[in-house]
Structures are given as structure tokens and as C-alpha cells.
Amino acid sequence: MMGLGMVGTGRKKACRFCSDALISMDYKEPKFLTFFVSERGKIVPRRLTGNCAFHQRRITEAVKRARILALLPFTASHR
Amino acid sequence: MREYEAVYILKGNIEAAAAEKIGEKIKDLIVNQKGILLGHRYLGKKTLAYRIEKETRGNYYLVSFLGEGPVLAELERILRYTEEVIRFLSVKVAEEIDAKKRKEEFDAKKIIEPAFGSDSRVEIEEGGSREAR
């Protein structure tokens, strides 16, 4: 698997949430959300994840909520 | 009526009795404000991703309820001044809910409640004496 980085291959990834409606997107599931967050804690951009705009917005919101609840870090440099 | 849910985090070293008391207070509050309590649940004790009020661990609770704005306002007020609560987040889940139907759905456990994933950063500890509702 090529992971999230499909840059330069020219193939457009399909949005995983559009193709599988059963995937839940919940701010209470940090393990799932780490997939959309870089090592530094940044949200991975749409061009890398392949999400559509609609689902990327949901992801963004979920990550931000998880950060408030200290389920995800705001930055990697937290003590 | 709207459906709301709120997650609140209690200090890591809180005693079970104290946590229970806060839970009861919140449940009573929702009922007193003419809201409908859907569920109140212990989500687990976890390591926080960053320190909050010098705490490194926290006990997570989830409360779901139906109601109008004032219920939420009162809940937030209480959570804000309860000292053991180190962080909370309330979220509007849905607008214009059929209260009776939703309550039945919840009671029939048609609603699959999410469980915390377990990874290195946020591992779940067994709740022990605390029951998960």
C-alpha cells in the first residue's frame, strides 16, 4: 500500500467515506482520527487523504473536537 | 426538541463516590430542566494528550439528552463551576427530534455507541467499581 501519499502518481483516489457509508466519523474515536493527522498533529490535507470536500470538513471538525477533549494533541511538542 | 451530547472529563484521581455524585447531579439537572435523559456513560480513564490543569490523566463521561437551549446552558454552567471537571465539550447531534421515538430507539439499544479505540496514547483502563452506563 502506498499509504496516504499518492502525490505525482496521477491517480485520483476515491473518497473512502463516499464509497463506504458505514464508516463512522466520531470525535470520540481518536484511534481512527490519527489516520488523518500527521506525526506533528497537523490535519492531513485532502490532496493526500483523497477525501472529498464534504467528508474532509467532517474529519476536520472531528479532529478539532478531539483536540479540545485532549484525545489528540494540538502539537507534538506538548510535554 | 434537539438532541445534544456532552463529554466531560473528571480529574484522574477522583474517587468513585465523588464521580458518581457529579453524575447524579447532571442527570437530575437535565430532568429538572424538562429535558429527556437518553444515557449517561463512563467512557474510561485515559492519558490526556496534553496536560490540563496539571492533570495527566482523566476520567471521561458521556451524557446524551434531548431538550431545548436552556437545558444545555444550565448544564454548561454547572460543568463550568464544578471543580473536578477539567474539561467539557457539548455538541448538538440533531435538530427537530421526535422525542418519544428517539428515546425508544435509545432504550432499545439501536443506537450503537462508539467505544474509544485503544492505542498507545489513549489506552482504556478497566473501570473497576464504576459501572458503564
Image: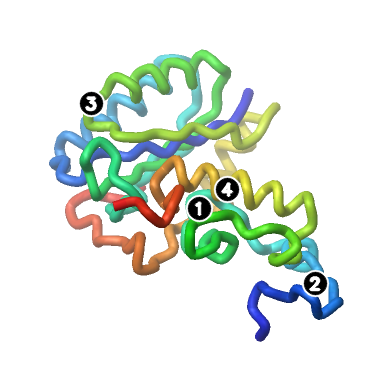
Disc 4: which chain? A
Q: The numbered mark 1 sits on a residue in which chain?
A: B
Quadrant of the drawing holding the N terminus of chain A = bottom right
Identify residue type, mark 1. Answer: Glu
Instruction: Report the chain holding disc 2.
Output: A
Up-down relation of residue B49 to residue B64 (above or below): below
Q: Looking at the picture, does residue B54 appear above or below residue B123?
A: above
Discs 4 and 2 lie in a common subunit: yes
Quadrant of res B97: top right
- According to the picture, the residue beneath numbered tag 1 turns out to be B113
**Chain letter belonging to callout 3:** B
Q: Which mark lies nearer to you, 3 or 1?
A: 3
Label 4: few (<14), some (14–19) or many (≥20) C-alpha neighbours in 10 Å: some
Check disc 4 and give the amino acid type.
Ala
Mark 3 → mark 1, Cα distance in angstroms: 28 Å
Q: Quadrant of residue A4?
A: bottom right
Q: Do pointers 2 and 1 mark residues of a single chain?
A: no
- The answer to whether the residues at label 3 and label 1 have Cβ atoms under 8 Å apart is no
| Amino acid beneath label 3 | Glu
Circle 1 packing at 10 Å, graded few (<14), some (14-19), many (20+), is few
Distance CA(mark 2)–CA(mark 1):
30 Å
Q: Amino acid at mark 2?
A: Lys
Q: Are callouts 3 and 2 both on one chain?
A: no
